[in-house]
Image (spheres, coloured by chain):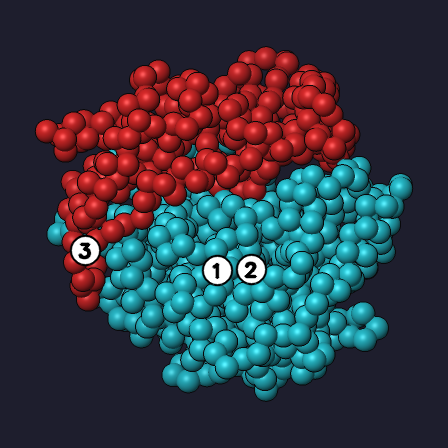
Amino acid sequence: MIREHEALVVGAGGAGLWAALELAKAGVDSAVLTKLYPTRSHTGAAQGGVCAALGNQEEDHWEWHMFDTIKGGDYLVDQDAAEVLAREAIETVIELEHMGLPFNRTPDGKIDQRRFGGHTRNYGEGPVMRACFAADRTGHMILQTLYQQCVKLGVKFYDEYHVVDLLTEGGELGSGGRAAGVVAYRIADGQLAVIRSKAVLLATGGFGRMFRVTSNAWSLTGDGVSLAYRHGLPVQDMEFYQFHPTGIVGLGILLSEAARGEGAYLLNKDGQRFMERYAPKLMELAPRDMVSRAIVQELRAGRGIDGKDYVYLDVRHLGRQKIDEKLPDITDFVRVYQGIEPYTDPIPIQPTAHYAMGGIPTNIHAQATCDAANTVVPGLYAAGETACVSVHGANRLGTNSLVDLLVFGRRAGRQMVLDVKGQDMPDVTDAAAEPVRAEIEALRARPKGERKEAIRKELADVMMDDVGVYRTAEGLESARTKVAELRDRYQHVSIDDKGTTFNTDLLEAREVGYLLDCAETMVAACINRKESRGAHSREDYPERDDVNFLTHSLATKGADGAVALDYKPVTITKFQPKPRVY
Amino acid sequence: MQIELRILRFDPEKDQKPHEQTYTVEAGPMDRVLDLLHKVKYEQDGTLTFRRSCAHGVCGSDAMLINGRNRLACKIRVDQLKARRITVAPLPGLPVMKDLVVDMEAFFAKFRSVQPYLQADSLDPDRERLQSQAERAVFDDTTKCILCAACTTSCPSFWAQPSYVGPAAIVNAHRFIFDSRDDHADDRLTILADRDGVWRCRTIFNCTDACPRGIHITQAILEVSSRIVEHQA
């Protein structure tokens, strides 16, 4: 039986939930699909804060936030989008407070704010207190607050429905077609549901699980990005992937930049605050790409702790009261996952794969676009980490992921409200589920093949080793060969669980397929970008090259299945590119 | 070292009733139980089924019964269990869908029943509502809840009477009842004064012991009951 809603939201993180609230407030028949329960979404893992130039602690202006975002993104940011981000950060944070978010407070009862990497006063003079926070569980509180409001407004949820295909009408997405709904796999019993819709928002998060060491949840497998790509949409700026400097060694669990915002040090084996040699003005609060590179440089120079592959994050001098009040969760992680007491011992850390700056190209209304002229794809929207609007350019500043999902989640919802009016419901039938049903049945029926986990592990290794903090032509070429080999092997993947009840074996196998798409486009875009900008550091091309590469990449699936690359201009309004020093 | 992992399994497509299956896995002291479950699933038996997502104790997906106590599999280490034999079973008191996966619908319905959202009657001001640090501190603890269900499904009162709203829902009601910005505490107190509300709590403290977020749940329940008594007086 076919179902329909005027609008569908895929993914129940911050972006999806806020969009759903806008749709519900406007009385649009809509629903949210999530492969988890909404409160399990990875927005909940965000820790340190959400920046907005409230000026509660010291003078601040949205123009400063806009500038920091553009400079932090190494001038690959679309400046019209950065302006929207910085302006609307203020009203969305205030709106969240009105929804009940329990922000920490200043002595006079306002939202408390603290320092964060790359956020500065007066266009780069020094750190500014801009990050609004709720202890070190800001993302948790955003996710909970938005979900609470969804409960209040009676938003319709399809919990544990895994979206396995995107429906189109009138051609594929890049060739004049429009989005027409989704096919969702009900995890409980394996039933496929066709849900047609006039508007589909992809808000499925990132794809950090393609790396060996990552802060990302197991669920972050690039589902939305991959499905759009398979249906003809380009993916933008895939070469820009952020490594967060302070992950727990080996596990990659995030230790928030808020620690450094509160004053924590980074130390090498000589006990030296080595950031003084890389970013003398901002020190530990330099942007993440620079701090991650500094750590790798220290390790290469043999200044890792005991000659190993980590350095120290040191919070000891902050004192117990500040640690307990402002950093309770991350210090708990250190105790549980490293068996270390942060009151008395420094914390071993290393860079961890964290955030995709790239994704589905959109305009500032969260409408997906399909070419260098920014032609809008009817009915398709993207927001949050899935999207590339682009407010993060080549490197995202800390807290701006939350700002992004609030601002553009809200915009997506509002735009969908406008766009569904007067639209016809797509003419989609149950038969639309057949292609993906055939894929699923083939996977279920394949008697003996390779385990998916072997493929995922080898992918994670090659991406970490060859497409990590530093990149070279040689490493990237070997990654391309390896990803292609893994793609071939993936054709023969088989699963143990042939059942229909809660078959995570099957769904994880599909997720590996999504990761392979994301990895393939990432490697191709990396190879072609022969410069170093933001998080994309080519050792063979160490300089930024504005003449040839001040441009967004667009990777499209060619007719032969290979990645085809195109480029589109960066929108520059107020700030001309300058050398990026801190 | 080698760990013997005894897992209570149930596949409704094959099994009449749950049965124990034993796996042997190689593990280090710092491995979490979730790591061991992954080893089984990825190296030995792909049919083993469990939920997990963030893998560091903030999403609440992988609560299960481990060596007789409700815990998050991603937040309990092998060395903390001090045993070479580890038993794993689904959360007690909820219907099992498959292996370690339970049906969470009834649990979330209880959460929704306590009006777990801010209700302020005054118009939203242009800027933030003011709240003192002391006012915020009153409900800080209960904002930590991740809805993993470890508390509710460890509660003997819930086992005995499944209609009991349970600790998790009360924690989430507490979070708003004690928020100075909220104007509808009385509505929630009325809901929780019901026969399936706070009075079913027998202060057994299982919930507090089970909470992976360290929330003082029993204390929160007692604060709500006291408020009901004041409210009724």
- Indicate whether A527 appears above or below B38: below
Q: Colour of chain A?
A: cyan
Residue at the disc numbered 1: A16
**What residue type is disc 3 on?**
Asp
**What residue type is disc 1 on?**
Gly
**Residue A236 rendering spot, x and y as whole percentages:** 61, 72
Left/right placement of residue A154 relative to residue B192 reads: right
- Indicate whether A231 appears above or below B148: below
Q: Nearer the viewer, residue A305 or A148?
A: A148
Please count the marks in the image. 3
Tell me the crowding category of disc 3: few under 14, some 14 to 19, or many 20 or more residues within 10 angstroms, Cα based. Answer: few
Q: Is disc 2 in contact with disc 1, using a CB cutoff of under 8 Å?
A: yes
Q: Name the quadrant containing residue B44.
A: top right
Residue at the disc numbered 2: A10
Residue at the disc numbered 3: B121
Q: Colour of chain B?
A: red
Q: Chain of mark 3?
A: B
Could you tell me which quadrant the C terminus of chain A lies in? bottom left
The residue depicted at 45 percent of the width and 43 percent of the height is: A255
Could you tell me which quadrant the N terminus of chain A lies in? bottom right
Look at the numbered disc 2 and give the secondary structure of its residue.
strand
**Residue A141 rendering spot, x and y as whole percentages:** 36, 48
